[in-house]
Image (cartoon, coloured by chain):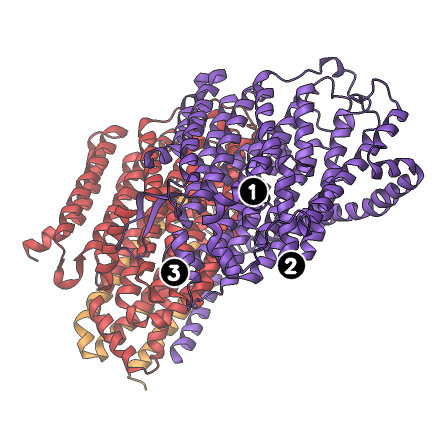
Chain colours: A purple, B orange, C red
Amino acid sequence: MESLVVLIPALPLAGFILTGLFGRRLDKEAHWLAVGVVVVSWLISMVVVVAALSGRLGDAGLSIKLWEWIPAGKAFHVDVGFTVDNLTAVLLIVVTTIGMLVHVYSIGYMAHDPGYWRFFAYLNLFMFSMLVLVLASSFLVVFVAWELVGLSSYLLIGFWYGRRSAALAAKKAFIVNRVGDVGFALGIMAIFVNTGTFEIRESIEKLTAAGAVLTVPLPVIALLVFAGAMGKSAQFPLHVWLPDAMEGPTPVSALIHAATMVNAGVYLVARTNLLFAHAPDAMVVVAAIGIFTAILAASIALTQTDIKRVLAYSTLSQLGYMFAALGVGAWAAAIFHLMSHGFFKGLLFLDSGSVIHAVDGEQDMRLMGGLSRKIPITYGTMLIGSVAISGIPPLAGFFSKDEILASAFKNGFLWVWLVGFIVAGLTAFYMFRLMGLTFWGPSRVDRQVEPHIHESPPVMTGPLIVLAIPSVFLGLLIGFPPESGLIHQWLEPVFTDGLEVLHRPEAAFNVFGIDGALVLSSVLIAAVGIAVAWRLFGVELPRLSREPDPERVRALTARAPFLYRASLNKWWFDDLYDLLFIRVGGRVAAFLWWFDRVIVDGTVNQIGIETQRAGRLLRQVQTGRVQNYALGIALGLLVMAGSYLVITAR
Amino acid sequence: MTNSLDAYLILSGLLFAIGTFGFLARRNAISMLMSIELMLNGVNLAIVAFGSFIDRLRPNASVIALLVIAVAAAEATVGLAIVIAIFRNRRTPLVDEYDSMRQ
Amino acid sequence: MSWQDVAIVGPLVGAILVAIAILLVDLVVPGRRGPALTVALLGLGLVAVLTALAGRTPGQAFGGAYTVDALTTFLDLLFISIVGLTIVFAPDYLEPRDLPIAEFAAVLVFALTGAMLIAASTDLLVLFLGLELMVLPGYLLAGFAKRDSLSTEGAIKYFLLGSFSSAIFLFGLAYVWGITGTTRVAEVAAELARVAAGGAALQPGLALGLAFMTTGVAFKIAAVPFHYWTPDAYQGSPTPITGYLSVGPKVGAFALILRLFVGALGPLRADWLDVIIVLAALTMTLGNLVALTQGNVKRMLAYSSIAHTGYMLVGLAAYAGGRQEGLQGLLYYGAAYTFMNLGAFAVVAALQHRPGVTSALETFAGLGRREPLLGILMTLFLLSLTGIPPTAGFFAKAYVILAAVQAGGALSVLAVIAVLNAAAAAFYYLRVVVYMFMREPVAETEPQRHSSLVWAGLWATTVLTIVLGLVPGPLLSVVTDAAKALTS
């Protein structure tokens, strides 16, 4: 078993090295090696996952020591090792499965790209780093992997470096992440200073042990770790890099910027849950930042016209949900949502790639429309993804999102629940706006491109269909019955200590009590969101009627009372729409958009500009004249002599 | 005061300061080299003064002073070679005209 | 002088003989690179073996003025590899520019003898002698392209300011000698320990001596605000020599700091700790800030080498703050910095193979496509300089910073400053990577041929940069012993 675990990251590493060395010669055959290693890695992962989740590795999981990075007997002792427990196992499922499918999909998507082999080499590098990240047992190794995923993400965002915007986006992603990393590094240092170890489990036990004397307060340590998570998981105000990162090829957006890397922050906080449980104030901050990011991003997604940007903001918003869950102490729900979101958002991104592929690289939804019949598989799977993310039962997103909202409500975080509830409605709206603009209504595709619209090759549609399956069934499979499904049983050993500290009231799930009401309300708000979007962007449903037929639509909508009323009172609804989405909503969205671009983004850019300016100012000192330099040295000498006289006199 | 260690040390400090001033004020590379020699002489004076006023320093003092003189000579050799090289390139010994690398 | 003394100074004598042998060979077969290089590299190998042998029997010679211990051995081997790598990288650059290779190698080996003398000296006077012996050849090397006006300009600035600072250093040395009454490091330390134990305020003369010596040493390691000479001297010098100057004299000056500040002035460390903290913070921050604005890679690396001085000073400060790990970190950093920085400069030099090619950022545009291997190696060196794991640079930085954190107090503030600086460094190092991999070449130039010597050197630095990051254990044992030898 131990050597199997080591093979999981080792195979992609070998793939990276070999593809990197010989890829140029392999050229269009370069994918065999890269995809092959990931498939094998997936198979091994599944064996390990089954062993872990069936409890054969024990509650504490399997620990493997690879080598001593800093040998014992020195000032510090650091081992490089892996730990496989149930949390790792769940992450392994997400990372290897989606990773493998994205690798396969890329064979088709990148087929005509001159940098074919380079792309696969980078993807392998990313897989290696991400797998080390989830497997590592010590903070130091997590940090190493943390930097490596950042690096591979940097390489992949800037993959089309010919585009200036791509190169800039890559740099921005790296630098914003670097800000979070500083916090993380400081957090790790603080942990090490107080415990003398980098081992995650051991150090957190020591930190939270009763009577531990800490030089740095526990909430500060927790927030420093959270700062790292904010960078990688793009939480406000470090979220600015993620929308720009869409400059990378779409498979990259699916794998790294939706399904895996951006989850690293969620994983990190979940991994250190005991630390946060002992710092309730820090948890409130986590919840607040999470839920604020959720609504900020969702409101921005309402007005975006680039298909990938809508999905990017949606990812931000869903990550916000996960952090809100982490903040209210619903750790299992957060990981559950991480998993289901990984699948359906990966699916949505790959679908968007397929759409972009079909319309010859166009990403503006205003230049799409009416694609549903031309690319039916893409349409069908994307519809599944959209329904899943909107939170309609019994698809995956419903179960996971609902658990987050219910936990927030029941744990007393009413404000989190309320904002999350609104976000649920917005989510449903913008997703179906996306569907409507892209697939329904009349075609607005460029006349030149129109005749060439085609469904993607099987190598691309295959992964779509495979990903659609968990998007539908995952919730039923592991999330039912709510709050005691399989996922909770799996994660119970990981979170049990933390939950004990939190003292959350244990209440059975009650369908006819508060839980039923919460479920009903979130389904309702999702339905409202969908209905509004449908009304505005999808009136001419080609599937339902060959020709535009308002009567038919009205009859159809009559089946749902709320939709019926909305439809009947057209004037009222138009006014409402006008009021909500154009006058008020539009302004709020525009304001948030402005706030995001000008204030947050601007601040980030301004910091860069200011440091450059300071640098230039300092550079003035460098006049090139010996006399000036000598004068500087002489003055320095005087200051030095003065300070020594002061120091030694005390 | 006139014939004490302090007096010699003050003198050596003055010599050193004059050398420093010369280094800062002169623009000619050769003059700057001479100023450095003056600074080293200031140091040497301090060394010799320590040696002649404090008995246990006496055996070392002259050795150290000789060594400093030797080092100064070596420095001057290297320095003159470099000054000649740049004079050939620039046709001027004035160091404030050597500023083609400010950025 | 006994036979035992001869065995102890054997490596030093060997190095002098190697330098002379190079000159003799050049006299017999003038103008050919082969024989001189062979003699130089073989000779250095021999000196390395001698050093390792001498290191097995620690001892003192010349009445305690010259000491061979674990620190001496470690530093000597480091110096030998610096000089060896420079000799390996330089010919490809010097030859097309008609610069004499044998002379270059001989001058470099003379500088090596100075550095070795510093590493072994336990006498203030010998320390000064070693310092001068190390920096004088440095001045000559900076102006090695004597028909190039930039090279000579850099050299004269380096020389004038260097001599100025040497005089300042010597002034301080004279006072410390005059007040403590001895030049032996151990005796100075004992005397100062007595003074410090008395609890009385230090004599002003001693305080001045400290100030003058700190200034002189700060100049040699290019700490802010005594760094002004670095960018000019580095930019003007022929690129492989810039590589040497940014590493050799710097590590040598740190050796001087170890012998002088830790060895002789150790008892006064409460007094110089604050000064070192301020110097370290200034040096890191200013070095990084100015490096941000540079458009020339050589100049950028010059400023960033200032920043690296700052990180090494953090290690020294951590030691003064009571953590032995600070010294270990400083030594480890010195080794890691040596290999990654020499590697980076070697790539710059390789790009400038043809005369007339500048080291501007534009030269690097499209390198990733033109010469992918060179681009990848450069990326590795830059990542290591940035401190991205799992490279040597990351480990060294982490170790130094952790030592400072453990020391606590003002040093934890210094550690935070160091972390922030390490983050900021990504900006300018990455810019080069962006140019290499994400820009089209300005002018289409075909790949150049690099000699197998250069490749061998590049691979050596690459392997060391990776290995020192992944398996730091062995070198860590060595530097632990070296630090112990110094402080026990």
Give me the disc on residue A336.
1
Q: Nearer the viewer, residue B32 or A80?
A: A80
- Residue type for callout 2: Gly
Categorize mark 2 by other alpha carbons within 10 Å: few (<14), some (14-19), many (20+): few
Instruction: Of the two numbered discs 2 and 1 on the same chain, state the one appearing first in sequence.
Output: 1
Q: Secondary structure at mark 2?
A: loop
Tag 3 residue: A195
**Image-quadrant location for residue A546:** top right
Residue A298 in percent (x, y) is at 71, 43
Question: Which circle, 3 or 2, is nearer the viewer?
Answer: 2
Q: Chain of mark 1?
A: A
**Image-quadrant location for residue B34:** bottom left
Residue A103 in percent (x, y) is at 52, 25
Looking at this view, name the residue that lies furthest to the front: A512
Q: Is residue B48 left or right of residue C235?
A: left
Instruction: Of the two numbered discs 1 and 3 on the same chain, state the one appearing first in sequence.
Output: 3
Q: How many marks?
A: 3
Q: Is residue C49 left or right of residue A72?
A: left
- Residue type for callout 1: Phe
Looking at this view, name the residue that lies furthest to the top: A451
Q: Is residue A368 above or below residue A29?
A: below
Give me the disc on residue A544.
none
Categorize mark 1 by other alpha carbons within 10 Å: few (<14), some (14-19), many (20+): many
Q: Nearer the viewer, residue B4 or C469?
A: C469
Q: Do the residues marked 2 and 1 share a common chain?
A: yes
Tag 2 residue: A412
Q: CA distance from mark 1 to mark 3?
A: 31 Å
Q: CA distance from mark 3 to mark 2?
A: 33 Å
